[in-house]
Amino acid sequence: MKGFKEKKVLGRKCQSCGTVYVPGPTYCRKCQKEIDTIVEVKDTGTLGTFTVNLADIRGNPLDKPNIVAYAKMDGSDTWLMSRLEGWSVGRLCTQVCV
């Protein structure tokens, strides 16, 4: 989370196989080696999919839609899931949906 406070996206790079993880685990899932190399990746990426939640887990309506996205940051080999803050459904669909 340190990188996010500095407005940077940080991951971990396996020196054995070169895989870059965001967020970064302490070991490589491919070769099972310990990872201690921190790398910065770009703050741009590819949106794989997203969902718009209109209700909470109990079915109660939310005050405003909650958007959750699945994205792969440029420079990373892995995908991450995160809530999109500051985005409206209309903005997301005019800039991303096809």
Image (spheres, rainbow, N blue to C red):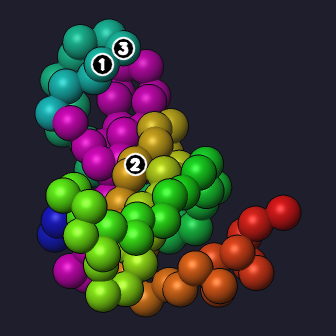
> Looking at the picture, does residue 72 appear above or below residue 44?
above
Which residue has dot 1 on it?
29
Q: Secondary structure at mark 3?
A: loop
Mark 3 to mark 2 CA distance (whole Å): 17 Å
Mark 2 to mark 1 CA distance (whole Å): 15 Å
Specify whether 5 is left or right of 62: left
Numbered mark located on residue 30 in the image: 3
Which residue has dot 2 on it?
80
Residue 56 is situated, as x and y percent measured from the top left of the image, at 24, 64
Is residue 79 something one can see in this rendering?
yes
As for residue 10 lying within the magenta part, the answer is yes
Residue depicted at 26% across the width and 61% down the height: 59
Residue depicted at 50% across the width and 84% down the height: 87
Is residue 7 something one can see in this rendering?
no
Give yes or no for contact between labels 3 and 2 (Cβ–Cβ under 8 Å). no
Give the magenta part as a residue range: 4-25
Q: Nearer the viewer, mark 3 or mark 2?
A: 2
Residue depicted at 44% across the width and 30% down the height: 19
Amino acid type at mark 1: Arg
As for residue 14 lying within the magenta part, the answer is yes
Residue 41 is situated, as x and y percent measured from the top left of the image, at 46, 59
Q: Secondary structure at mark 1?
A: loop
Residue 93 is situated, as x and y percent measured from the top left of the image, at 70, 75
How many C-alpha atoms fall within 10 Å of the one at disc 1: few (<14), some, or many (≥20)? few
Amino acid type at mark 3: Lys
